[in-house]
Image: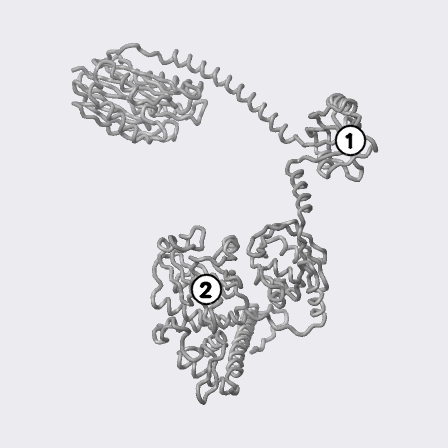
Amino acid sequence: MTSEPVTPAEPGAAPDLVELAKIVARQRAELDRLRDQAATSAVVERAKGAVMALTGCSADAADERLLQRAKAARHTLLEECWITLGSLAPTAPGPGEAAEPAGTHSPGFGSDALPETAAPDDVAIALARLGQALVQVMTPHDLARCLLEHLAPGMAADAIMIYARRPDGGLELIGHAGIDARLAAQWSQVPPLSGIAALDALRRGEPCWLEDVATHERRELLIGDPPERWRSRAWLPVPAAGPAQVCIGVLRGRAGSFTARDQAHLRGVTGLCAGRLRAFDAPPERAADAATDAVQALFDALPIAAMLLTPLRDTSGEPEDFRVEAATPRAGDLLGRPGDELAGRRLLEFRPALTEEPLWQGCLHTLATGEPYESEPFAHEEVVAGIAALSTYSARVARLDDALVVSWIRHGSSDRQEQRLADLQRLGNLGWANWNLATQEASWSTQVFAIFSRDPAHGPVRLTGLPELALPEDAPALTRAVRALLQEGRAFDLPFRVRTSGGIRHLRLVAEAVADMHGTPVEVHGVVQDMTARRRAELALVESEQAILTQHDVLQAERTLAARLQQALLPQANRPVHLAGLRVEVAYLPAQSGVHVGGDWFSAVELPDGDALLVVGDVAGHGVDAVATMAQLRFTAKGMVITGSSLTGALARLNTLLLHSRDSHATATMVLARYDPRQRRLVWAQAGHPPPLLLRDGQVRYLDRPKGMLLGATATPVFEEAECRLAPGDRLVLFTDGLVEHPPESIDRGLERLADAVAAPHADGPGSLGQLLARMLPDERRDDVCVVDVRVPR
């Protein structure tokens, strides 16, 4: 490790923190380099030892042999060491030569291997980097994460899954990365079924390339929820001297084939992983410990499931895993491995999802505080003789010096029944009570004490003392019911109230008597249920119904008042009227839901100079306020135009009036039109309103809208006028949005339907306005409808 002198600071001067930080960073980097070098040396020495053991050569000869094979195969020395460690079975020696490690006699593994010359340079560089990274891998999960980091950039890998073959022929997930804990738990154990790509790859000893998920989904069981999450996958058996026991899956979210480069890359990856995985197979060597051996001997004789765990701490001193020092045979049943295979292994190798379970936190708490931990009962599925059975267990953790003793207790059927009964009482907020009339003894379940908020240390209350717990107004009825039960054996089901520390509670007591051979009650069985939540819900429902009835009466009164106001303010003619040479029909239809009267209005009057004023408008909202605003705008607009205001000037003043009205948030839309019969000239302006519809010679079109803003929206509106010359036979329809807007249909579709209805044959004769309304309006109107139908006589 290198170091650098630090120039002392002058007295009173602040130290150069930046320089100190740089020195610390360099020292840490040097420490990491030395650690990597030590780990790499350990791998090389282990590979040399394997060659020496299998060939009988010296250390220097083994070193030279590894170097020569690495050079011939275009590997780095570290890659060749991993490959050598992955295939340790001896081969038959030829004449005059010693046996060599299997797998070191050729550049590749098995018949799958491509010639090394086929691997591009970038693949060789990537494999060299992976070989170096593997020295820091300590568990199968670390290996999966390392492979994902290695394969994600160049191959777009999204997830890695590592399966090991179980003795029954199925698969066990020993490492994964890129998938969530739920999916990992779902696919942690795979039975020996056909149609599973990972199993097929292990059985054949050949990689399985799934490059079209839609095709493979029809004949294979694909991992994923949904399977389309990964649209291409590769399953590669890890090379071994005998039948392959481990399979690595590479899952990609993108579709497409694995190119020749990808396949060569993945074959090289599995060759390197073989050595790393073989190191996982053997439990870490432990120093001889008489105490641990004695504990293991004791555990072997115990008829329970138990383990002795020692913590494995990270650099900060926090526990990151536990090593199994000793385990009973039944502990292996719970972890899915024989008990004799547990000792020396990491706990998370068997249960990776344990860190998400309460038991893990219990272990950490006991290790830190020394307080024993007892878990809640939990279900665990056991496979006995190929049959899955669900059992209930509880776990207990106790500290033994710096180790933990974890034991599991399997609950029998009676224990489960008691637990279910306790759960039933807790979830239903009810409990049982029993009174022996002969001995005057009483017994309550725990939940009854909780319902009455009574300290269990005070004991249960006698049956004749129950009325004393009830509110004074409920006590007489409960007293009569108890007396009838004791004297006549008459069962009862009675509600009553009690006062507790949490307030008034509504309870229900159901009781029946058990009589002797003479008919005399000798015992009483009862059930007490807390009905407070239900009673409160009933009271809230009654209050809500009363509020609805009150609101309904208010709405009805408001509707009646609004209707009378509108009838007074907006009289309708029973037949067409003639204004300035025009024939005008009007129609107003209120909404049929809610408060039926809204703020739609019309005006059709003849001005003193002989012109005609045509107006339609719509105030937002319904009810009395909308009718009042409508009346204000209707009469003000008419008065302004009669007294000489222009159409745009009238709209601007109406906007100011609306902004300063009692309801400053009110808004309205409007169309103002003035018709000069001498020139057949129609001048009009609008404020956020749909334009009039013109029918001429069988053709319909909406007039081009001039600029205009919603009334009440801004203090600086802009309004403009537009002009249209009417011809004999023209028909002009002014309307509010209730005619064309019917959700869920869009207003654009409503405008198209109105144009089609006006242009339809026989839509221009007598009574055509009624036909138009019947065709346009639904059975139930949600908004007011106002229409002014203008005809220019021929």
Looking at the figure, which quarter contains the C terminus? top left
Snapshot quadrant of residue 199: bottom left
Snapshot quadrant of residue 34: bottom right
Label number found at residue 91: none
- Does 358 sit above or below residue 527? below
- Please, which colouring scheme is shown? one colour
Q: Residue at x 60, y 66 (%)?
A: 341
Q: Is residue 626 left or right of residue 527?
A: left
The kind of residue on which mark 2 rests is Ile
Tag 2 secondary structure: strand
What x and y, as percent, mark residue 463? 78, 29
- Does 739 sit above or below residue 246? above
Snapshot quadrant of residue 708: top left
Q: Is residue 281 left or right of residue 121?
A: right
Tag 1 secondary structure: strand
What x and y, as percent, mark residue 782? 39, 23
Mark 1 or mark 2, which has the lower sequence index?
2
Q: How many labels, in total?
A: 2
Q: Residue at x 68, y 35 (%)?
A: 430
Identity of the residue furthest to the front in this view: 517
Would you name the residue on which mark 1 appears?
523
Q: Residue at x 49, y 79 (%)?
A: 90
Would you name the residue on which mark 2 appears?
248
Q: Nearer the viewer, residue 191 or 785?
A: 191
